[in-house]
Image (cartoon, coloured by chain):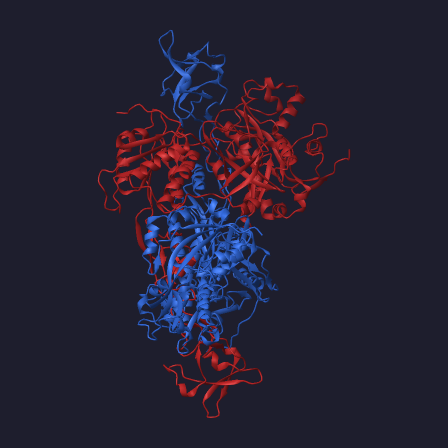
Chain colours: A blue, B red
Amino acid sequence: MKRHIYLEDIPLNEAWAAFSAALEANGLWRPLPTATIPLTEANGRIAAAAIWAKISSPHYHASAMDGFAVRAQDTVGATETNPLYLALIPNDAATEDTTINPVAQAVNTGHPLPAWANAVVMIEHTQPATLPDGRPAIAIRASLPPWQHVRPMGEDMVATELALPANHKLRPVDLGALAGSGHAAVSVYRRPRVAIIPTGSELVAAETAVHTLQPGQIIEYNSLVLAAQVQNWGGLPTRWPIVPDELDAIKTAVIAAAQTHDLILLNAGSSAGSEDYSAHVVQQLGQLLVHGVAVRPGHPVILGMIERRVPHSALPAPHSSCPIIGVPGYPVSAALTGEIFVEPLLAKWQGQPPHTPATLTATLTRKLNSPTGDDDFVRVAVGKVGDNILATPISRGAGVITSLVRADGIVRIPRFSEGADAGTAVTVHLYRTPQEIAQTIVAIGSHDLTLDLLAQFLAAQGHGLRLMSANVGSLGGLVALRRGEAHLAGSHLLDAATGVYNDSYIHRYLPQQPVTLITLVGREQGWIVPPGNPKGLQGWADAANPDVRLVNRQRGAGTRVLLDYELERLGIMPAQVNGYEREEYTHLAVAAAVAAGAADAGLGIRAAARALDLDFAPLAHEQYDLVIPQAYVDGDLLRPLLDLLHDDAFRTAVAAMPGYDITPMGRTRTITHPTN
Amino acid sequence: MKRHIYLEDIPLNEAWAAFSAALEANGLWRPLPTATIPLTEANGRIAAAAIWAKISSPHYHASAMDGFAVRAQDTVGATETNPLYLALIPNDAATEDTTINPVAQAVNTGHPLPAWANAVVMIEHTQPATLPDGRPAIAIRASLPPWQHVRPMGEDMVATELALPANHKLRPVDLGALAGSGHAAVSVYRRPRVAIIPTGSELVAAETAVHTLQPGQIIEYNSLVLAAQVQNWGGLPTRWPIVPDELDAIKTAVIAAAQTHDLILLNAGSSAGSEDYSAHVVQQLGQLLVHGVAVRPGHPVILGMIERRVPHSALPAPHSSCPIIGVPGYPVSAALTGEIFVEPLLAKWQGQPPHTPATLTATLTRKLNSPTGDDDFVRVAVGKVGDNILATPISRGAGVITSLVRADGIVRIPRFSEGADAGTAVTVHLYRTPQEIAQTIVAIGSHDLTLDLLAQFLAAQGHGLRLMSANVGSLGGLVALRRGEAHLAGSHLLDAATGVYNDSYIHRYLPQQPVTLITLVGREQGWIVPPGNPKGLQGWADAANPDVRLVNRQRGAGTRVLLDYELERLGIMPAQVNGYEREEYTHLAVAAAVAAGAADAGLGIRAAARALDLDFAPLAHEQYDLVIPQAYVDGDLLRPLLDLLHDDAFRTAVAAMPGYDITPMGRTRTITHPTN
């Protein structure tokens, strides 16, 4: 029977305290047991104990050069003009014949120094010679200090010295130091075994053929993400097959997983809905410690302990309890739950402090509103534009995994804060290195598929340059340029008075800034309509047909400007347009709305219609420009991107997209502002 | 037949140019062929082509909440005081009965929105109700905007959108985005296969039992280090068995490796000595491009191409040539050759730019002399002491792998530069993160084994704190404190006039600085002698015995101060001491010299004698203090370290070392300087 459950709002630090106390009580808040493994498998593992040198390295006095072993005192007095002669003794002479001093013996690099010798003369600094009695010898023309060109025993490490401390992550050179000090194996912490159990009757495996997908079916990929996270954090993940939303089936899976794993991630069903079983499963099989943590995203997190039925021999330490984390179902919540709860636990089990991401101070480009009750983890894009490091919130839902894919870092807004204003300095916990941030070209403005292609071609060159684009519409792009928030803006703003694209808007919005406009592409705008154009749209006037449900672009988009311009020209009021207020932010989103039947038509580009197998009724040709402040046109960062506009492969790829005209690509004009 | 070879001095950039030109000519200066692999194996791999969304995500309009699907327009006018009632229609009703408007239908999170609905009202915002005709209904008390609590189709990704660009390294969240957009597999670059062939008749495998080692035998571990490097850089290493120094045997191995690998690392034999065969092998089997690069360490590098005999079917692209790198034998040279030549090549083959380490600007603590002809890669230890970031060169030979283990980064001194003065700002290419540097406690001064134990206990706590110690002797430590280069200094400097340790030296060397002295340990000093004390040493006077070859500590070491004090007391002149000028920097190095028979005795601590199974003739008890500037005593960084002095486990471990007295451990005295 399901008992009554409800979701709490436990602050993050209290949730962690409850979890770690329960782990402590079960002897699980400490590193895992150790295993001894050969050095050949030890790269990246964590040393479980201090490692002391077994032997010295080198373990004998070694020649550091190709040359001759000598006694330094025999060389005193040798000069350029007064060479000294040293008799050569054979290499197999075990001991020195003291009657034939002074002597020398050939040695190569790494050879042991004979016991009687204390220096090596390099072969280049000797000449072959013969003594008066006919014995072979060498001539030397400079004296040597003792221990010249000798690697004394223990130069690198002396036996019993500390080679590496415990809890050290073994790097390639560390393996060399261990081998050199006499170790062939090393004691490391056992890897944490983590069971990942996806639950949900609506789920289908990511391996399923996508063409069989039905509405309501959801591709299960949280287990892929969690498994890869566990792997990156040193654990061994096991992905369980999908379990349907049935209490007993989930219990059976959890009981089995607990026998052979150190940790269970149960995903999802962690909320308090009618089909959310996770809390009941944990209550019935063990102890529910926390249900609901005041973090966003990721609120419905469960922390608990499962009692093991049979101590399993495969687990070196048969603890009676197995920790379990109920992971929320939304993909962003799931991935952040991994970072917040799973990573620190795996680190602890490997003797490591929790991962501390590198941080960067950046200026917030937009106001951030945050619920005061939660620790808020805000995904941000970070760009360095000129001397400014800027963080732009990626403000989309917990279901949007691409918000994490595109995130350069996280800004943490603590509980009891209501957020931060635009212009505030915030700390970004980085997913990328500061170098990667510095190699990012920030494009803010109108969306066009050609920008995706440009990003793609840029990445393919392998220079490490990255094009990040934010779609805020043409006007939004000009505003971003004015604020110094972007390197370039895509813009297609028609000036109704002149019929010229962009120039007059730039005079108005960027009156102080010298900019260059480079045409990216010419393209067709028209009605994106369902296949066969069932409502027979042809011209601008169809916008006023009450029977046609339109989907619109957001205010400030060039496409919206175009529509408004044409509506005004025809005397159509926005209130006459069915769907005028339904806004989308990209051409593809408009096409998607039409494809889903949510709208009968939307204004957009031909390629977007073609992408979703829709029809297209052309209305206008327009020009899409890149607006670039002069400093970046002249600088190095954008050079490879601008060169691509003249690259045959890139031009061919753009021309292959329907509705695109590459004839104007690369045309350049510089806007000079009249001096006021 | 071996042909005449000699080592050149080709500048690094020219060597790279020659190598990449030859690779280019063979079609090898580009990413490797691709392979399609399931997402479950794709974590960390590099996407070989742009990945475009196959389906939209979500692929239908989905409810974002548990609640009821409604039409937004039906909710207009609902208020707290004037609820509206919506008739419930069953979930299996495929289409809406328009005669019973307004209606609602139960939906859970993720469920598809019925085609007639355009919003979802949360279950918490409804009450169950019954219509006058008896039908079940819900009451709502607020109107909804259209698309409230709906995840529109394509909210995350729209089909045909760019999901990820080519050359992107796949992270956990990326796998989610790929699965969500309809991909079950991904095209990645094949991993580079790298053969690592160790050569040398003097080599024994690292797996060999160390007690069988003979002088002249060298433990082969470069192949371990190179294999782990290759692994970290995305390649698949093959470690070849050790090949003896025989031309034909090496040729046979190289020919076999070339058939099945993308790159061969031949180690060593890359110099120009009588047993160096690598250049001959490359000449005879292909093309020797470069032999000798002007870098230090790592000069005798070979770059070449091997001609493949039979194109091998296991290699997707059966190029006729296989690049080969002759890697120098000294371990530091070998590891740096990996970083300088192997990493950029593997990166290129994976569509990546070469690794760019994070950099830090630091102040050089010592003068750096650099050969003008070479690009000099200087290993440095980096510490943050107060506000100063300091780089200290680790100036040891190419055979000292621990110099790389201890290095926090590399300072590159370019060709034509003679080095840099102490106090110069230099750029450090980091092996560690700046956070790790900030969590490093820098100890400079006298060496004691207790410091190794302290480092070990500190690391075992898992806070991420690290103790780095540099052994420069007691006086050197005080000088480092004066310069602000260390957090603490170990010191045992006897004041002959007072018999008190350290205080008078601190007055002299740190007259302006408030410091606290905390006694780490008391310990015995005495003669370290071979087992059985064959020369019968007993007292200080034995230092003057011309038959006893001593090994001494360096000037400024507390042990040296002690010896000098006693020699002066007895009226013995340094010139009377056999071996006075032979200096070592640690107790263990002194013991190693005695163990190797290079000296008959040396002054040092009992634990060092015991470590190498030597005998010990005690002479004196002394006190070893930690000297700590007051600011660090009061600060947070050193707290865990100072707490260890009162930790039972640590005290027990120190007491277990022979010759140590923990009674005074933790005794604290603050030095107040008389105001001048």
Q: Quadrant of the N terminus of chain B?
A: top left
Q: Residue at x 37, y 51 (%)?
A: A457
Visible residue check, residue B48: no
Q: Residue at the far left: name it.
A: B310
Question: Where's residue B363, x and y in %?
Answer: 58, 36
Q: Residue furthest top?
A: A132
- Of the pair B382 and A448, the residue shown nearer to us: A448
Pick the residue in front: B492 or B54: B54
Q: At which x and y percent is residue A391?
A: 53, 56
Q: Position of residue B529 (x, y in %)?
A: 54, 27
The x, y position of residue B365, in whole percent, is: 58, 34
Q: Quadrant of the C terminus of chain B?
A: top right
Residue B300 in view of the camera: yes
In the depicted view, which residue is nearer to us: B526 or B560? B560
Count the labels in the image: 0
Q: Residue B82, relative to residue A631: is it above or below?
A: below
Residue in view at x 47 percent, y 21 percent: A118
B42 versus B102 height, above or below: above
In which quadrant of the rendered view does residue B583 lie? top right
Q: Is residue A50 above or below residue A332?
A: above
Q: Is residue A391 left or right of residue B4?
A: right
Is B343 rendered above or below residue B275?
A: below
